[in-house]
Amino acid sequence: MGPSAWRGASGVPFVRETLVVSAICFLRQSLVEILSRAPEVRVTGEAASLDRALEVARATHPAIVLLDAAFPGGTQSAQMIGAAAPDASLIALGIRETEQDVLTWAEAGAAGYVPNTASVDDLIGLIGQISRGEQTCPSNIAGSLLRRVAASRRAEAPAPPAGPPLTRREIEIIGLLSEGLSNKDIARRLRISLGTTKSHVHNLLGKLGLPRRADVMARMGPWAETAPTTTGWAARPNQISPPPALAALIIDPHSTLR
Amino acid sequence: MGASPFLADLIRRVAEARLQTAGVRIAVVAEFDDLEAARWRVGELVADIVVLGGAEAAPTPIDGWPAPTLGLSADLATIYGPGQDDVARLTPENLAIRLLQCSSA
């Protein structure tokens, strides 16, 4: 997650207009100052209160809202700010990276989060990742999110259509077909040969009685979207500190510093 | 600190930009969320300044650590020290001023 500018599909660097929301003066001022130095970010506003955050969000239409997780009202404030800036990606800053906290913020509409163990360099990189719809997180949290989404969809979606039983691999392939992947892409994603992939797809279409792969979505309906797919989660890089000059030691005996 | 790596990095960044003009570099050598754990490391770590969280008044230096000590209130609204009567709103500017005071003490 380096400082290089993010690039759009055309390869042209772009910046993310960002609203910083925190009731803590030091945190807010520091973030605005540091993000303003990053070429990838343009701070369009800051807010210390919910009223101000809503006002600035409506006026500036930010692409990113960086919300301090300790902000008064917590996830309720997040939902209100999200409603005021519906096109913005809301990033929860400084959350504890536990399954419960991540799920709570995800359900409040956060597009991503920056854990309280991240560095400032991580923050800038994560803003870029999250604005592209990506999120680095530990595998246990990824698993919880997937389980929660799957359970939610199962509750909403109709039962799978009756028919011959599908293998686990065929179910995976339904999910990948629903993403519009080609056989080659599916082979790469599942790390199997192209021939094996073709065979799975052929068997799958036969079991479903469908002539074409494009018919899978129509045949399986919303259930196809809940089929599990393979997802890769990036590991967080180690942080390296520079050698000390003026050496500062920071201690919080009450664990209250964020 | 509870979520200290981020805050410690933030402190370093905002202080660094201001202290550079005075020819001073700053680095965070360690972070602790437990004062007792910090005491155990007194003999190992060399710190010129100690920043103590959860402060309600100007902190007294840690035994055996003769470095100036700054205190930050739990809500990160107030900075205390380095003198016993020094109290100010915690802002990047006020933090840098006090770090500079400590570095020249």
Image: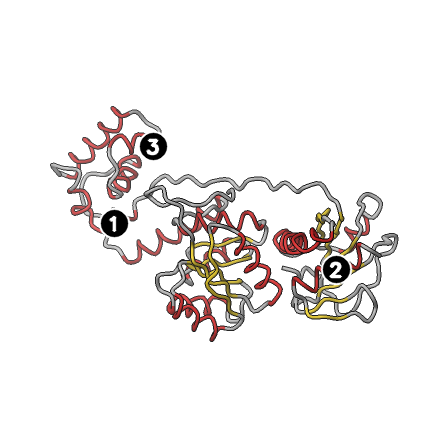
Is B76 in front, or is A76?
B76
- Identify the amino acid type marked 1: Trp
Q: Are marks 1 and 2 in contact (CB under 8 Å)?
A: no
Disc 1: CA contacts within 10 A as few (<14), some (14-19) or many (>=20): many
Q: Which marked residue is nearer to the observer: mark 1 or mark 3? A: 3
User: How many numbered markers are drawn?
Assistant: 3
Disc 3: CA contacts within 10 A as few (<14), some (14-19) or many (>=20): some
Q: Give the percent coordinates (x, y) of residue A89.
A: 40, 58
Please, what secondary structure does the residue beneath circle 3 have? helix
Is B23 in front, or is A135?
B23
Is A246 in front, or is B17?
B17
Q: Chain of mark 3?
A: A
Vertical placement of residue A54 versus A32, above or below: below
Along the polypeptide, which appears first: circle 1 or circle 3? 3
Q: Which marked residue is nearer to the observer: mark 1 or mark 2? A: 2
Please, what secondary structure does the residue beneath circle 1 have? helix
Vertical placement of residue A14 versus A47, above or below: above
In the picture of the structure, the residue carrying the numbered disc 1 is: A223
Please, what secondary structure does the residue beneath circle 2 have? strand
Residue B34: quadrant of the picture: bottom right
**Which quadrant holds the C terminus of chain A?**
bottom right
Q: Residue at x 28, y 40 (%)?
A: A176
In the picture of the structure, the residue carrying the numbered disc 3 is: A190
- Residues beneath discs 1 and 3 located on the same chain: yes
Label 3 to label 2, Cα distance in Å?
51 Å
Residue B91: quadrant of the picture: bottom right
Q: Chain of mark 2?
A: B
Q: For residue B52, which numbered disc appears in the image?
A: 2
Is A243 in front, or is B29?
A243
Of all residues, the one furthest to the bottom in this rendering is A51
Q: Give the percent coordinates (x, y) of residue B52.
A: 75, 59
Q: Chain of mark 1?
A: A
